[in-house]
Structure formats: C-alpha cells, structure tokens
Image: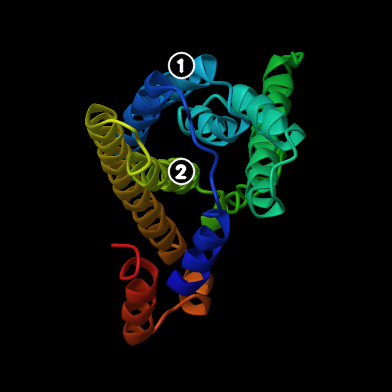
Amino acid sequence: MILRVASFVLALAGPGQLLENPEAQAKLVEAQQAFVDEDFDAAAAAVEEAYIIEPEPMLLLPWAQAERGRGDCAAAVELYQRFLDSDPPERMATPARENMDACQQELDAAAEQEVIEDDEVEVVEVEDDSSDVEQLPPPPPDDPPKAKAWYKDPVGGALVGVGVVGIGVGAGLMGAGSSAARGAAEQDSHMDYLGERDRATGLRNGGAVALSIGAALVVGGVIRYALVAKKNPKEATAWRLDPQVARRFAGVTFGRRF
C-alpha cells in the first residue's frame, strides 16, 4: 500500500510554481502547520489569505481540501471546480476530481435526507385490536456503512495537497537562490556582491524550510492514507509493502535531496 501511495505522491510533486510575494509565502507556511495540527478552520483561512495576496491557481487545491476537512463540502466542491477549470496537470486533476465527486455525493445524500425529514406523514388513529393481529418480526438492521477508500480521506488529501505546494515553493526558492548566487559574481562592486550573496542565502534558506515542511506534510499524508487503508482488510492486504522495499524507496526519495 505504501509503495502505491508514495508513487502517487511523487507523481503529484512535479515542478511547482513559485509564490513571489513573501506575505503569501508566509501564509502558506502558516497553513501547512495548521494542516499538521488538523486545524482545518485555520488552514482554510490561511490558504484563502495567501490566494487573495497572490491568486496562484495551485493554492485552490489545498484550500478545497481544508474546506472539506472542516465539513464545508459546498465550498470545497466550488474550489475543486475552480482548480480543475485552471487546467492543472492530469496527475493533480485526477485526485481533485475524485475528491470533488466524493464531496458532491455527501451533499446529495444530505439533501435527500433533508427531503425525507421534511415530508409530513399523516397520522391516523385506529382502534387497537392487537389481539387479532399477527405479530411480525422486527425488520433486519441496516447494513453497516462501507469504509471509504483511502484516497478519498480528506485529512490525507489535505496534507498531501499542501505538502506538494510546499515542495514546489521550496524548489522554486532554491532555484532562485542558485540563480542569485551565480549573479553575485557578476556584480561590479563589492557591496553589490555582498547584497546579492545575502539574498541568495536567504532564498536558499527559505527554500530549505519550505522543502522540509512540504516533505513532512507529504509523509504525514502517506501515513494517514496508510492508517485509513488499514481499517479496510482488503486494501490493507492488497497494498502491503515489504519493509526492505520501503527503506530502499525512502533512501532514493529523500537521500538524494538532502
């Protein structure tokens, strides 16, 4: 199961688009921490503020996940649709579409239940003649609800979505820092060189922080998916991963980045 989920996460973690505004970047980091704490109200508010400052379509996905995590499926469906309308890569559009469909199903079920409860049933009083009426057995209990698929879990999806954005932001900052470091050598004065070098160092440090937080969120999402799938015996059996394969995969994924 871990191998399949990790492959899915790496497919999402393609080249991200850099948030150029420092305030938007700060709000994104704040949202990432809120997702780790499972404070979806704070996560939704932080991502929304980041989007207002810098309307990057990539932010719509973690925003939708946060809204779904806090139980507002109506807002989540609208945000998922706006994200899909931005024509994202298919590797990100597919889980967004699946989560949107799951959220829409919840809305439809809630609406249907509300209609049933609003229907007025006319009560007719009849004469009690239970002695002549055959006693019927009680109806069978309802079937227990089916477990949700692991990839539709809102918490795991939120952690993965924001983690992917964090990795993209970190990669962009590291790239910008490398570019600034190369440009420092081309400065005409020593003061300009020092200024450009300090900017390069700041960008690289910010990129390292964003990459670390993004990677931590992705790992948290993977663990969350694993726990959800473990509740379903069929998925837990089908997605079992040998420990040696997991260690080798983790070494390839993170050993070459740090």
Kind of residue at badge 1: Glu
Residue 111: quarter of image: top right
Is 109 left or right of 61, judged from the image as shown?
right
Looking at the image, can residue 203 be seen? yes
The picture places residue 69, in percent across and down from the top left corner, at 47, 33
| Residue at numbered disc 1 | 49
Q: Secondary structure at mark 1?
A: helix
The picture places residue 139, in percent across and down from the top left corner, at 63, 48
Q: Residues within 10 Å of mark 2 (few under 14, many from 20)?
A: many
- Please give the name of the residue rendered at 47% of the width and 47% of the height, measured from the top-left corner: 164
Whether 104 is drawn above or below 94: the answer is: above
Is 202 left or right of 101, judged from the image as shown?
left
The picture places residue 162, in percent across and down from the top left corner, at 45, 40
Q: Secondary structure at mark 2?
A: helix
| Numbered tag placed on residue 172 in the rendering | 2
Instruction: Tell which circle, 2 or 1, labels the residue nearer the N-terminal end.
Output: 1
Q: Residues within 10 Å of mark 1 (few under 14, many from 20)?
A: some
Looking at the image, can residue 129 be seen? no
Image depth: mark 2 or mark 1 in front: 2
Q: Which quarter shows the C terminus?
A: bottom left
Is 85 left or right of 185, judged from the image as shown?
right
Q: Do the numbered discs 2 and 1 sit on residues whose CB atoms are within 8 Å?
A: no
- Please give the name of the residue rendered at 26% of the width and 41% of the height, measured from the top-left corner: 205
Kind of residue at badge 2: Gly
| Numbered tag placed on residue 182 in the rendering | none
Residue 110: quarter of image: top right
- Please give the name of the residue rendered at 49% of the width and 75% of the height, measured from the top-left corner: 239
How far apart are the two marked residues, 2 and 1, measured between alpha carbons? 21 Å
